Amino acid sequence: MATQECFVVKRLIQEMVSPLTYSIHIYYDNESAMKLAENPVFHARTKHIETHFPFVREKMLTQDIKPLQGSN
């Protein structure tokens, strides 16, 4: 959801100001979610989230987002 929201804001900024040429940094604290986003193979237990991770994976591969592990 954070990736989707970032791209809504990014499009708004691009329409109002100028194009953004850098990656968006998204901080995460869930290692399991990142492993699922990086892994193109889905398992039976992850059927309900199949639609979200391909979008995140695509944005990671095109370097539109840069996931960074957050620290406490």
Image: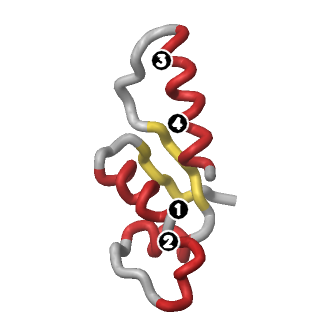
> Dot 3 lies on which element?
helix
**First in residue order: circle 1 vs circle 3:** 3
**First in residue order: circle 4 vs circle 2:** 4
Task: Identify which residue is drawn at 50% across, 65% down.
Answer: 51
> Which residue lies under the disc numbered 4?
7
The picture places residue 37, in percent across and down from the top left corner, at 44, 67
**First in residue order: circle 2 vs circle 3:** 3
**First in residue order: circle 1 vs circle 4:** 4
CB within 8 Å, label 1 to label 2: yes
Disc 3 residue crowd, few under 14, some 14–19, many 20+, Cα 10 Å: few
Any mark on residue 50, and which?
Answer: 2
- Residue type at mark 3 is Gln
Q: CA distance from mark 1 to mark 3?
A: 24 Å
Q: CA distance from mark 4 to mark 2?
A: 20 Å
> Dot 1 lies on which element?
loop
**Residue lying at the far left of the rendered structure:** 62
Q: CA distance from mark 2 to mark 3?
A: 29 Å
CB within 8 Å, label 4 to label 2: no
> Which residue lies under the disc numbered 3?
14
- Residue type at mark 1 is His
- Residue type at mark 2 is Glu
> Which residue lies under the disc numbered 1?
52
